[in-house]
Amino acid sequence: MKAPRVIVVSLRKAGTHLIREAIAAFGYSITGQVAEAAGGPRSDGHLDQDVVHHILRMVYTDEELAAITAETDRKVIDQAIRRARDALTDSWRIRLGLPESAALKGDDIGTQLVARTLMRGAARRFADTPPNTSWFLHQLDLAQVDQAFLREWMETGEPRMVLTYRDPRDTLLSMINFLATRGPADLAGLPDHQLYGEIIKAIPTTGERLTFALSDPCFPGAESFARALWLLRHPRVCTLSFEDLVGPEGGGSTETQTAAVAKLAAFLDVDDDPAAVADRLFNPGSYTFHRGQIGAWREHFTPEHEELFQRRYGNVVDAYGYA
């Protein structure tokens, strides 16, 4: 049976658009940091009535639920359902370690519902979140994630977890290019991107930007590879690299790309044709797309950059297979 819930931890600038295309092709609704970064609406699917009633019971008090049930105005009912779903989803974004500013939208009623939902034991199982949904995160930091979630995952094996990563040198270059070419409004979904975008734009050359990024301990994504080592090594996590997923248009191969999609499909228990799904992964129209090429770092790294890189990433680069 198809996995009802998926968490994809896609390290920043590791080709998130590739895995997103595959997950969407498998029929999952998308939530999490992908939609937030792009500033767009959540990709939510239809919920059946039983799921709607379950969500309402987890968020509202008995009195509030009775008032909603007695309501005759469809717009008021739909708003109450939307607020409940958002409160449950946003409470889990906080539990999964997303920055609170990215989870709470500044709506007073919504913020109160999120705070209430966080305190209610009835909403503490990830299995009670809407089904047929894939959550996209840029990290799942063991120091930040709700420990009850980890216990649930260890005991049940659900949700299914996927890690996607990329050569750290290409990841770094891609982040620099992304920050340099996006305006403040485009980066508003992730405040650290907005802040570092201003810094990167003030540095005149790619070489100097690389030197800065390799030297600044807080540069976006700097610690992602180290923090994701537990995911890389865990036998119940499906690991996929950008190089495997990108296909011939990004310097890879059709065979490797199709095999990677087949691996993901088997992990999620879906029966879609891997070749057909692989054919649609490379999407230059994606919000985060820049060049999408394997080994682009070789055009820009000097021996000095490689030395800085080894100092910074030498302890993890071998673990990911990028010697």
Image: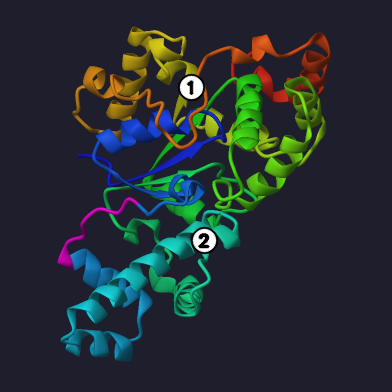
Q: Residue 85, percent across and down?
A: 34, 66
Q: Residue 185, percent across and down?
A: 56, 50
The answer to whether residue 46 is magenta is yes
Tell me where residue 299 sits by quadrant.
top right
Q: Amino acid at mark 2?
A: Ala
Please state which of residues 301 and 3 is positioned toward the viewer in this rendering. Answer: 301
Tell me where residue 19 sits by quadrant.
top left
The numbered mark, 2 or 1, whose residue comes first in the sequence reads 2
Q: Which quarter shows the C terminus?
A: top right
Residue 233 higher or lower than 117, as above or below: above
Residue hosting label 1: 242
Q: Residue at x 82, y 20 (%)?
A: 308
Please state which of residues 259 and 79 is positioned toward the viewer in this rendering. Answer: 79
**Camera sees residue 323:** no
Q: Residue at x 56, y 42 (%)?
A: 139
Q: Is residue 271 left or right of residue 122?
A: left
Tell me where residue 198 sits by quadrant.
top right
Q: Residue at x 80, y 30 (%)?
A: 212
Residue hosting label 2: 103
Q: Is residue 187 left or right of residue 21?
A: right
Residue 268 higher or lower than 116, as above or below: above
Q: Residue 293, percent across and down?
A: 51, 16
Q: Which mark is residue 136?
A: none
Helix, strand or loop at label 1? It is helix
Q: Amino acid at mark 1?
A: Phe
Neighbour tally class for label 2: few under 14, some 14-19, many 20 plus, Cα within 10 Å: many
Q: Please give the range of residues in magenta.
A: 43-49
Distance, label 2 to label 1, CA atoms, is 27 Å
The answer to whether residue 116 is magenta is no
Helix, strand or loop at label 2? It is helix
Q: Residue at x 66, y 30 (%)?
A: 176
Please state which of residues 298 and 124 is positioned toward the viewer in this rendering. Answer: 298
